[in-house]
Amino acid sequence: MSDKKPSTLRPLPNLIFLSRWLQVPLYLGLIVAQLVYVVHFWVELTDLVGAALGNQTSMEHIIKAVGHGSDTGGLTETTIMLVVLGLIDVVMISNLLIMVIVGGYETFVSRMHLEEHPDQPEWLSHVNASVLKVKLGTAIIGISSIHLLKTFINAEAYSEKALIAQTAIHIAFLLSAMAIAACDRIMPRPSQEEH
């Protein structure tokens, strides 16, 4: 711990530096979005359990949500799989939101000083803008993979053009993440001090 006092900035640099706090409402908005995803997750899960127990209204909600149902009116393995993949998708998007909220705040706004906290995420100890970009790219690829898998499982509900377009978009995400990771690897690293 250093005993140095922070230097006082001139008015304009101080104003520019303080502008980072304008991001706080954005992160708070993402927390509200996360809450919406939590509610959506529980609605979908409740419908899945209700449909498994024979509730016709829940079954109708599921068929409407996934665009796939059985002629017998009951759950099929494919329908269950599509709902579960949707739940996994919500969890992965929620993880992405946490990375953006916590990592972005820590990187661009202010330190959270979680070093001694037992629940500090492992990745947060070495997060910076480059690490955050690579992690976000990887998370987006995971989310895109889930969407693509859902599309392929329910392929009869999509046109060939839609299948090709979704595959091309996934490949573009993959190539973008690889390019970001490659750029991060070749960029010179500043000497890292011990935490």
Image (cartoon, rainbow, N blue to C red):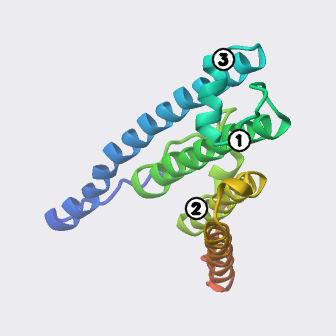
Mark earlier in primary sequence (1, 2) = 1
Question: What residue is at 65 percent from the left and 73 percent from the top?
Answer: 177
Disc 1 packing (10 Å; few <14; some 14–19; many ≥20): some
Would you place residue 125 above or below residue 166 in this image? above
Amino acid marked by disc 1: Ile
Identify the disc placed on residue 126: none
Alpha carbons under labels 3 and 1: distance apart: 24 Å
User: Label 1's element?
Assistant: helix
| Residue at mark 2 | 132
Observer able to see residue 6: yes
Q: Position of residue 23 (x, y in %)?
A: 33, 51
Say which quarter of the image contains residue 45.
top right
Amino acid marked by disc 2: Leu
Query: Relative to residue 157, is residue 152 drawn left or right?
Result: right
Identify the disc placed on residue 56: 3
Q: Position of residue 150 (x, y in %)?
A: 72, 51
User: Label 3's element?
Assistant: helix
